[in-house]
């Protein structure tokens, strides 16, 4: 319980500093939110009135306290500068779509990447190992936007199997899932191989094998479980990267997620929406890392004593 309390307190501190960074980045980038909201051809006096109405004339500390206070007490992220819609409900709808895509991507990466890594470790230096690791290097090297375009060209334009853009059905998720998960698949496969090779050389693995245990039990129950700590860390980090990769993937596939909302907001200089999207994505990444730390206890009880 003490460990859990420490982790929660650390989570709150990190989120606090992350919110400050998100807030300051928006205020220090070039451009004037009041001018963007007013549009071209508006007099300086009218722009100043808009700035006052938005509270931009107040000190940054006061603006930050008001902004965070509304988020914490009301769940109010403010209004969009472009269409004056509440940002919270808009992000909630888009963020749900991004979470679905990211979970599909990481699930695709895990169910293929971990078996690839296990087989490569068992068949070290064999043709299977070389082929699997060659595929992993290829997956790491290919940019997400390039993979997305190739998948659209092959499976949508040429073969007509999957829709190229949009959302609403499982078929719409297939190509974006492959595009966003392929890079993570390669990273997870490489990490699984490295971790498994280290564990397979340990004495307790040779002892379990010498006792006549089924080889599948030795690999899955003893070796894989003890190799999971770095793999879990990699999965957690990759899931965070998927949220970042969603910006590119959702733009290419015209998928209505928070990444596409962020890109559109940047294009239109909708500063309040950018600020909210950045805070939500950053917050999820930090929370996810805390969950990963807590999962370590299940796979390695020795961490409880650390």
Image (spheres, helix red, strand yellow):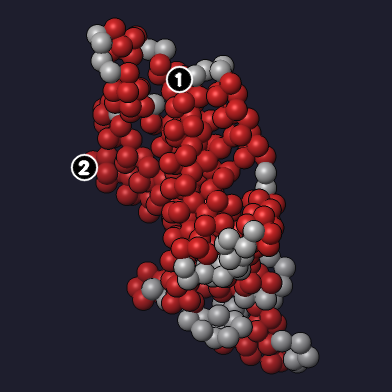
In the foreground, 207 or 29: 207
Residue 114 visible in the current orientation? yes
61 versus 283 height, above or below: below
Which residue does the numbered mark 2 point to in the structure image?
Answer: 1
Check the image and name the residue furthest to the front.
Answer: 159
* Mark 1 Cα shell of 10 Å, populated few (<14), some (14-19), many (≥20): some
Residue 303 is left or right of residue 101, and the answer is left
Residue 24 in view: no
Q: Residue at x 45, y 20 (%)?
A: 122
Residue at position x 33%, y 27% from top? 220
Q: Residue at x 58, y 60 (%)?
A: 161
Q: Quadrant of residue 24?
A: bottom right
Q: Nearer the viewer, mark 1 or mark 2?
A: 1
Residue 106 in percent (x, y) is at: 46, 48
Density class for disc 2 (Cα within 10 Å; few <14, some 14-19, many ≥20) is few
Query: Image check: 240 left or right of 216?
Result: right
Q: Which dot marks residue 122?
A: 1
Please state the horizontal and vertical placement of residue 55, each as a whole percent of the image. 55, 81
**Callout 1: SS:** helix
Name above or below for residue 267 compared with residue 160.
Answer: below
Residue extending farthest to the left is 1
* Apparent side of residue 301 relative to residue 172 in the rendered image (left or right): left
């Amino acid at each position: 319980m003490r460990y859990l309390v420490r982790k929660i307190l650390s989570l709150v501190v990190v989120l606090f500093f992350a919110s400050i960074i998100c807030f300051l980045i928006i205020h220090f980038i070039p451009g004037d939110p009041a001018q963007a909201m007013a549009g071209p051809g508006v007099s300086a006096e009218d722009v100043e009135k808009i700035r006052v109405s938005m509270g931009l004339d107040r000190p940054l500390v006061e603006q930050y306290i008001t902004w965070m206070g509304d988020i914490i007490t009301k769940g109010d992220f403010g209004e969009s500068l472009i269409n004056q819609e509440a940002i919270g409900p808009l992000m909630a709808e888009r963020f749900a779509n991004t979470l679905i895509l990211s979970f599909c991507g990481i699930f695709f990466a895990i169910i293929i990447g971990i078996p690839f890594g296990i087989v490569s470790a068992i068949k070290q230096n064999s043709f299977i190992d070389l082929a699997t690791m060659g595929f992993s290097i290829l997956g790491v090297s290919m940019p997400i936007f390039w993979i997305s375009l190739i998948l659209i060209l092959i499976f949508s334009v040429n073969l007509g199997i999957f829709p190229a853009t949009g959302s609403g059905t499982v078929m719409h998720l297939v190509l974006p899932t492959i595009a966003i998960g392929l890079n993570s698949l390669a990273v997870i496969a490489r990490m699984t191989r490295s971790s498994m090779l280290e564990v397979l050389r340990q004495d307790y693995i040779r002892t379990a094998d010498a006792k006549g245990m089924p080889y599948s039990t030795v690999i899955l129950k003893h070796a894989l479980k003890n190799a999971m700590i770095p793999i879990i860390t990699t999965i957690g980090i990759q899931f965070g990267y998927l949220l970042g990769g969603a910006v590119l993937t959702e733009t290419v596939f015209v998928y209505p997620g928070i990444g596409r909302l962020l890109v559109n907001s940047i294009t239109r200089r909708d500063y309040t929406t950018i600020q909210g999207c950045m805070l939500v994505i950053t917050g999820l990444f930090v929370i996810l890392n805390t969950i990963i730390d807590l999962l370590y206890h299940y796979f390695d009880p020795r961490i409880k004593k650390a």
